[in-house]
Image: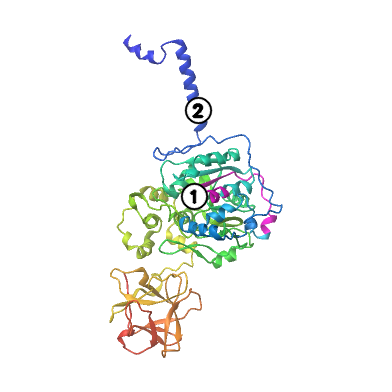
């Protein structure tokens, strides 16, 4: 009898038995509803925690505007908002706090009109009716109210509703009061198409995006920043291309919204693609000749070596199959290059879609805390090391040339990402350089000389003096750095270019102090000045001048003077690191 006694706690009496069975049935039904078998629905880690507010209704109260009708008001048709008096002062204060003029933004309608910046051919393109559905995911943390909600309004207003599966607002632990209950209430007007997830601790943009991708249920995942305005016909071209090519990861053309005046402007033509610096920062680059020749139309997709990162679209299943984002990366930075290298090396492509335009407020800084776990103030650096170690093979040496301090830095376990690369049978980074970005200059391959250009007599080295190489700079000299410095790395190519990563040395002659000149660094092209390294002298072929440190000290601009044989101040050697 004692063996049967535990059954009393389950079925002691008939009424309780029936009640228990009903409760179990309800529990099973609830589980199957929210976590259907085979859906592979992502379960948020316990420490993240999310809340889905009960904002779902059967009817959308929001009325989508008719943009074919003339509209009037501040900022309509993308016009600038100009402030005066106290409002101007407040706007200037906003620029320091928010890195955008919130006063100007608040004057705009949530549904403001903007110019259609697409190429004329885009407006006559017909798209299939059976395009895949889209989940638009917008990550935010303590974003200003009107830029955030204008992003949502623009997506709902300018997307075909039969293709817009959902808009997911993912709150990465905002602290501002108006982004709490007020936001829950506001989005009810969209009838449930706009959903809100709240994280209970901050995990940063990268992991928040990954969480959003797992929570989304549309066929295509589209990430937008929280200060954007989707333009006319922005969604269909993305969905159509993904329907054609499942492994294409796409970027809309990013139009410019002034952070100060909210003026909206854009270009119908695609004039640049994504590139990168060996320091693993993103840069805009010219479209390569092979890609220009391949494209037969101005509205064809443009293959890009990298993406800027904030705005992208991908088949959701493919995005997760190819590795999503690296969950070991913290906050923000480096993830855009990591996904770019990975997608290309693992069989996909990064493409810009000319007929899809989205405006973006370009801010000069971040208004929120960018510190990583453990007080890490260099999340871009540590994230980039993870990228370099997993995807760049031996070419990671060029990253460490810029960041030697990170060579021994522990950036967490890389085994899962390396296993992913092996599982996907991804190609080498050399393949990526040869086939995706063949014009990328590799400073230590196929060159006559490489390293620090040192004058032994003075102990001074040719140096950029930390000047911004995004524009034409004048070169200087500085004390040679033990262990090397990226600011002192130069290459002499077989074609005679004395160069850096994207700039080449030329001589600007002076008429005031006799025969000499300063060294300028314009962008490299086929017409750059030629140099030779003969008997230790770095000689400029057109003028016959040689680099000379005579009478100079560390921090001065370098000069070129008439070559004098065996002059100690004109002797230079390449020192490799």
Residue placed most toward the observer, 312 or 473: 473
Quarter of the figure that contains the N terminus: top left
Pointer 1 local density, CA inside 10 Å: few below 14, some 14–19, many at least 20:
many
Q: Residue at x 47, y 41 (%)?
A: 198
Q: Is residue 494 above or below residue 234?
A: below
**Mark closer to the observer (1, 2):** 1
Q: State the residue position of label 1.
A: 143
Bounds of the magenta span? 121-150
Of the image marks 1 and 2, the number of the one nearer the N terminus: 2
Gap in Å between the C-alphas at discs 1 and 2? 35 Å
Q: Is residue 389 left or right of residue 79?
A: left
Q: Is residue 26 magenta?
A: no
Q: Which quarter of the picture shows residue 366?
A: bottom left
Residue 262 visible to the viewer:
yes
Residue 212 visible to the viewer:
no
Q: Is residue 21 above or below residue 33?
A: above
Q: Is residue 417 above or below residue 576?
A: above
Instruction: Give the percent coordinates (x, y) of residue 53.
Output: 51, 36
Instruction: Give the percent coordinates (x, y) of residue 459.
Output: 28, 78
Pointer 2 local density, CA inside 10 Å: few below 14, some 14–19, many at least 20:
few
Q: State the residue position of label 2.
A: 30
Instruction: Give the percent coordinates (x, y) of residue 60.
Output: 63, 39
């Amino acid at each position: 009898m004692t063996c049967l006694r535990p059954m009393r706690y389950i079925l002691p009496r008939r009424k309780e038995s029936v009640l228990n069975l009903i409760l179990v049935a309800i529990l099973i039904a609830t589980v199957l509803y929210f976590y259907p078998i085979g859906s592979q629905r992502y379960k948020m880690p316990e420490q993240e925690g999310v809340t889905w507010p009960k904002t779902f209704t059967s009817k959308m109260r929001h009325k989508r505007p008719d943009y074919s009708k003339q509209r009037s008001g501040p900022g309509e048709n993308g016009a600038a908002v100009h402030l005066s008096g106290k409002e101007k002062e407040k706007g200037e204060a906003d620029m320091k706090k928010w890195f955008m003029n919130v006063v100007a933004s608040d004057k705009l309608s949530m549904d403001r009109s903007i110019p259609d910046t697409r190429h004329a051919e885009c407006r006559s393109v017909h798209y299939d009716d059976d395009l895949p559905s889209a989940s638009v995911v917008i990550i935010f943390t303590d974003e200003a109210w009107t830029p955030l909600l204008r992003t949502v309004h623009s997506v709902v207003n300018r997307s075909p509703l039969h293709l817009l599966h959902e808009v997911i607002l993912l709150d990465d632990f905002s602290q501002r009061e108006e982004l709490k209950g007020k936001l829950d209430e506001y989005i009810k007007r969209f009838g449930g198409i706009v959903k809100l997830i709240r994280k209970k601790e901050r995990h940063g943009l990268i992991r928040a995006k990954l969480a959003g991708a797992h929570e989304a249920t549309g066929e295509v995942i589209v990430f937008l920043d929280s200060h954007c305005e989707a333009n006319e016909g922005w969604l269909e071209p993305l969905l159509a291309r993904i329907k054609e090519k499942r492994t294409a990861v796409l970027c809309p053309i990013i139009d410019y919204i002034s952070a100060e005046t909210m003026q909206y402007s854009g270009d119908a033509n695609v004039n640049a693609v994504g590139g990168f610096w060996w320091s693993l920062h993103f840069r805009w680059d010219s479209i390569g000749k092979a890609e220009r020749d391949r494209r037969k139309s101005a509205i064809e997709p443009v293959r890009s070596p990298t993406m800027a990162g904030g705005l992208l679209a991908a088949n959701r299943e493919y995005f997760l199959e190819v590795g999503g984002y690296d969950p070991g990366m913290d906050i923000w930075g480096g993830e855009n290059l990591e996904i770019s290298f990975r997608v290309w090396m693992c069989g996909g492509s990064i493409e810009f879609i000319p007929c899809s335009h989205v405006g973006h407020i370009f801010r000069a800084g971040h208004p929120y805390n960018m510190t990583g776990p453990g007080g890490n103030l260099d999340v871009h650096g540590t994230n980039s090391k993870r990228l370099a170690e997993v995807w760049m093979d031996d070419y990671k040496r060029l990253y460490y040339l810029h960041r030697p301090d990170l060579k021994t830095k522990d950036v967490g376990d890389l085994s899962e990402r390396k296993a992913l690369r092996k599982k996907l049978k991804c190609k080498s980074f050399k393949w990526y350089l040869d086939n995706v970005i063949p014009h990328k200059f590799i400073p230590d391959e196929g060159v006559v000389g490489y390293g620090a250009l040192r004058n032994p007599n003075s102990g001074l080295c040719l140096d950029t003096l930390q000047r911004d190489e995004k524009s034409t700079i004048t070169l200087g000299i500085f004390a040679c750095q033990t262990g090397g410095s990226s600011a002192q790395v130069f290459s002499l190519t077989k074609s005679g270019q004395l160069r850096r990563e994207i700039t080449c040395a030329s001589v600007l002659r002076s008429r005031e102090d006799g025969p000499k000149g300063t060294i300028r660094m314009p962008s490299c092209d086929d017409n750059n000045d030629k140099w030779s390294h003969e008997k230790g002298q770095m000689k400029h072929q057109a003028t016959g001048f040689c680099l000379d440190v005579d009478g100079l000290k560390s921090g001065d601009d370098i000069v070129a003077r008439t070559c004098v044989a065996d002059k100690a101040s004109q002797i230079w050697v390449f020192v490799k690191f």
